[in-house]
Image (cartoon, helix red, strand yellow):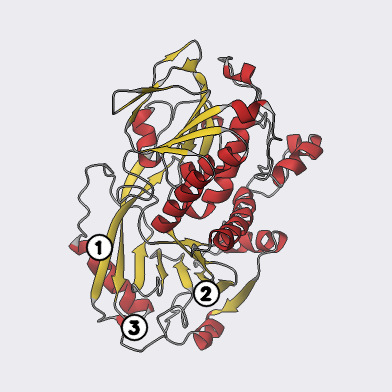
Amino acid sequence: MNSPAFNSAVPPARTEIFSVSASGHLSRRSVLKAGAALLALNCFSCANAPGTKATRRHVVVIGAGAFGGWAALHLRRMGARVTLVDAWGPGHTRASSGGETRVIRAIYGPDRPYYKLVARSLELWKESQKRWQRPLYRRTGVLWMAAEDDTYERASLPLLDGGGFAYEKLTADEAARRFPHINFQGVPWVIREVDAGYLLARRSCAAVLEEFQNEGGEFRQLHVTPGRIAGGEMQPLVLSDGSTLAADAYVFACGPWLGRIFPGVVEISSTRQESFYFGTPAGDTRHQEEGTPAWIDNGKLQFYGIPGNEWRGFKLADDAAGPVVDPETQERTPSAAAIQAARSYLALRFPALKDAPLIGSEVCQYEKSRDGHYIADRHPEAANVWLVGGGSGHGFKNGPAFGEYVANLVLTKRSVDPFFGLDRFNGKLY
């Protein structure tokens, strides 16, 4: 957007970028705006030329997690002056982007926008790993175990084909022959994504920050209090050191704190999630990366796992939403009930590990939007404020592309995609 848009209390009219209905049909607007839509479908790569107004614009990004860190980096690469602020630092233990590892995969049922995001993100993860000469992504493949009601998986196959994602469709018997140490009981069939794998989470957040600073961005570790909203804009931020910080635009990518900062505008619920690391037998590589891909079970018991984790252990986590918690004050001690549930699942699917010792654990949270989809939209009462969040347990992998998308929203006249906009909640504040 240009400077006058920041002085307007009324956001510009919104048009679809790459939203497609659950039935898979292109929207009427997408058809009418074919040229613009094509550009947006390939989005996340648009940048302003040097010397444009964007090069003189100052943007403050609050939150150095997957969404905020990558948004700050892309904003800087587009020529903006960028200040990134975080109360505890990138990938800290309280953050949704903390911890050791995250799965990257492309299966998303009928939710077409995510296939574009994953494809672009995978490209950026690989490119950044090569450029920065540090590990970010490990290509182990991912086994997706279909549910008994496999509507979600069947909806994914044509979109995997259309997105150019390499995969195999295996029967349960074929999967069992390929991976005899896994019990596929109750699994009707399996998808093996070839280029999927896992990401090094907190280390990636630190790497993004380091590159952001190398490219001229400023980082400040301080707590932020939003400025008051007056005349359709937010006034300067107040920082915990007593100073104020003024900018042309403010991007709040605060993860589980987003709803607390803007109650009645966005609703984010934080649910407690526990991950466990089990020790494998000495010298046994069947349950390491060499013998087992990352995996996701979409059945009645929704667990996922990442073998190996750069030799930390066999990671196992329950994907079902836990109790609602306060991410700032919740204790991070694992619960006996969650440990027992993990052991029971381990005995079912990976019987050779049923007595494996628990060698590590992490307690984090999912910061979930109401419908589980991401949020990227203007504050309805402040045209210079962007609200970004709702990673909902699956956002980390898409940080590079979603951050690029956000940067384009802030610095160009690109319209908000309704799939990620607040208007999808029927104009109501949740």
Task: Report which residue position mark 3 lands on.
Answer: 351
| Tags 2 and 1 touching, CB below 8 Å | no
Q: Is residue 289 above or below residue 114?
A: below
Q: Residue tagged by mark 2?
A: 188
Residue 277 percent coordinates (x, y)? 30, 70
- Residue at the disc numbered 1: 338
The first of marks 2 and 1 along the sequence is 2
| Residue 60 image label | none
- Quadrant of the rendered image containing residue 53: top right
Q: What is the three-letter code of the residue carrying label 1? A: Ala
Q: Position of residue 48 (x, y in %)?
A: 69, 35
Q: CA distance from mark 2 to mark 1?
A: 27 Å
Q: Residue at x 62, y 74 (%)?
A: 169
Identify the amino acid type marked 2: Pro
Q: Nearer the viewer, residue 307 or 138?
A: 138
* Mark 3 surroundings within 10 Å by alpha-carbon count, few (fewer than 14), some (14 through 19), many (20 or more): some
Name the residue rendered at 63%, 38% in the picture: 78
Q: Is residue 422 above or below residue 326?
A: above
The secondary element bearing badge 1 is classed as helix
Q: Between marks 3 and 2, how big is the CA–CA gap?
A: 19 Å
Q: Residue furthest top?
A: 231
